[in-house]
Amino acid sequence: MDAQFVLFRAQLDESSTLRDRIRAVVAEIESASRVATAALLLVHQPVPLADVLVKAKAQVEVIKGLYARLAEVLKECPGQYYRLIASSILIHLFPG
């Protein structure tokens, strides 16, 4: 019977590690998105539009790379995407 719990514990640890990796990449995406939004807010200031667009475009490239990283992580767990995202949402809603 202990062997069953050892296996179950290993699966829980693996799932937790994967969720943490997803959460880390998503946090980076959110941060880069905030930087892009801040860069775009400069359109309301007396700053040349070309400068505003260069800064925003640079962040878009960063965000593309981060989504590619997220895709690589998700490829490691085919068929589990919705389970992992749902549990991540629950953790956000009910921390601790």
Image: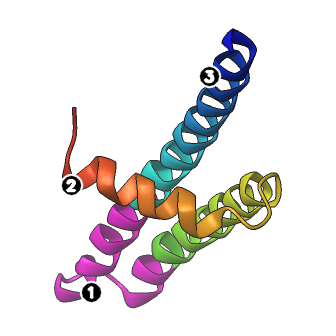
Amino acid type of the residue that numbered disc 1 sits on in the rendered structure: Val
Quickly name the residue at label 3: 9
Q: Which mark is residue 35?
A: none
Residue in the image at 79% along x and 56% along y: 72
Say which label, 3 or 1, has the lower sequence index.
3
Residue in the image at 44% along x and 77% along y: 51
Image quadrant holding the N terminus, namely top right
Q: Main secondary structure of the magenta part?
A: helix
Quickly name the residue at label 2: 93
Residue in the image at 47% along x and 70% along y: 55
Q: Residue 37's x, y, as percent?
A: 32, 73
Q: Residue 42's x, y, as percent?
A: 25, 77
Which label lies toward us, 3 or 1?
Answer: 3
Span highlighted in magenta in the image: 32-53
In whole angstroms, how far apart are the C-alphas of marks 3 and 2? 24 Å
Q: How packed is label 2: few (under 14 Cα within 10 Å), some, or many (20 or more)?
A: few
Please say if 51 is above or below 3. below
Which label lies toward us, 3 or 2?
Answer: 3
